[in-house]
Amino acid sequence: MSGIFASLKIKWYVQHMHKVQLDGGPKIKDYKSYASLSSSVEDFLEDCKKFLPKIKGNTIWMINSTETGGGVAEMLPSQLRILREQGVKVEWLVMETKDEHFFELTKRIHNAIHGSGSLEYTEHDKSVYDRVSSVNAKAALQYIKDGDMVVAHDPQPAGMIQYLKKSADIKAVWRCHIGIEHHNDVSDAVWQFMKPIISHFDHFVFSIPRYVPKFIKDNFTIIPAAIDPLSHKNRTLQLHKCIGILHQSRILNNKEPVIYDFYKYPVRRVTADGSFGDINDPEELDVIYRPSILQVSRWDKLKGFKPLMEAFVKLKEKKEEFKTDEIHRKRIQKVRLILAGPDPEFVTDDPQGKEVLDELKEVYKKLERDIQKDIAILLLPMNDPKQNALIVNALQRSSSVIVQNSIQEGFGLTATEAMWKQIPIIVSNAAGLKFQVEHKINGIIIDDATDTDLLAKSMNKMLSNPKTREKWGFNGQIRVIENFTVFSQLKKWLELFARLSS
């Protein structure tokens, strides 16, 4: 280690950064064995032959702010595992801090990049951001050496780069997963705050062209987010396996699991008084016996949980208006809304999660008892990432319709996951969502996430047309295979790494 941090003892700062150790997972041969994926894998392997010789010898460091929760933490393990199998030296570091103001600030930055929230950033904000960035950069220098490449994901680790570059000869990329289609005063203000921070990067990566701020000009690459089709969250679940997971997590409660034991940490449900209780209180959820509408996301005010719940209440209250025949009347009568998200205690970089969940609980507590029975707000355990992923997978595959009602959405992998599983989807017109979904081809795009009448009508339309749902579900999977798998994503990363290495 050299430079301005050389005299500091590693023990003083090692607690502020840790390297993530990955478990095993699918190999390239496993992906190739799926006919739907084989073409994407072959294209990726051809690109490896072209680009890998240019990047061998370098270590690539991915840095973000959490090991669990959110799209970045979900995408990185598959990316790293596949790249390593091809001989790429790539590692994952997670920054840490006990300074609560830091994550409150970066959440404000996150919201502002989406065009929502604060216009002002104080000297105290800047000093907190700089201090945490500096300490984590010192910690990172026990790992990062001259000649390495660093990819910092989103605003949290972006400030580290100016300090890293003072002590190590590195190339740095800022990967921004968030943005707004039409910039406003709030987004302009936060970009002015971020501009000197990100000026130290050599290149920028965004998900959608419209997210790129004007001052970055031509120095960027567009790489959409993507799913790993063979991850625990997306792998195919045979019927008995899917039902087994629902039993293990206690979502189904009519018998003991047949093969595996109950999960140690069950899914919990908001009860009538707002506390968390048994999944089948006030009555059994019955997800495999009744039509269900699902939204699963972080507890974030931009995810549109509240208007979705209000729209579902309208769907129930106006069921006579929506009735087309006796069968559909029964669908509306029996349909359940499931709002699911992670335990906020496990998502360390999102301090607003508990606040948003508490607000949603207060709305739920005021509903009529009959409506409460048909809405389930679920807290998904995060103690075991594999079990969490399998629970989400099983819930998605058990749903009739999946909704992502985001007011703003950087990309929205939950939409990608739904389409991969051939579940029809209703999404808002947030840029990341309409970038994926094709209106009335693989789902419905609504113009306004807060328009509860339109949401209710869209849910009714989906429920009343089972054959259309099947068609749209099939079309959705094709859309993902062609555009949004991990291999299409990694091809673009390899090209970028090769370009930066030359």
Image: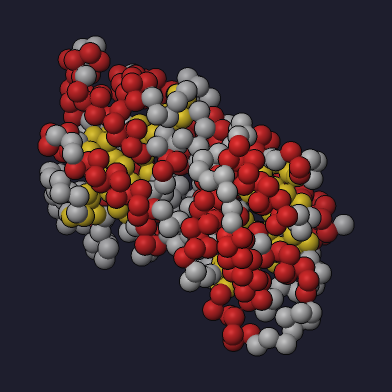
Q: Residue 307: x percent and y percent?
A: 34, 33
Residue at 79% in and 55% down = 202
Residue farthest to the right, as pictured? 502
Q: Position of residue 248 (x, y in %)?
A: 25, 57
Figure disc tally:
0
Q: Position of residue 275 (x, y in %)?
A: 19, 54
Look at the image and tell me in which quarter the N terminus lies.
bottom right
Scheme of colours in the image: secondary structure
Q: Which residue sits at x=61%, y=65%?
A: 127
In the image, is residue 300 above or below residue 138? above
**Residue at 25%, 15% in the rendered image:** 322
Query: Which quadrant of the view contains residue 76?
Result: bottom right
Answer whether residue 81 is visible to the viewer in this image: no
- Residues 434 and 490: in front is 434
Q: Is residue 451 left or right of residue 246?
A: right
The residue sitting at 41% across, 43% down in the picture is 301
Give the camera-side residue of 247 and 137: 137
The residue nearer to you, when weighing 268 against 226, is 268
Residue 207 on image: x %, y %: 63, 41
Vertical placement of 196 versus 168: above or below?
above
Q: Is residue 355 left or right of residue 77?
A: left
| In this rendering, position of residue 462 left or right of residue 134 | left
Quadrant that contains the C terminus? bottom right
The reply to whether residue 378 is in sight is yes
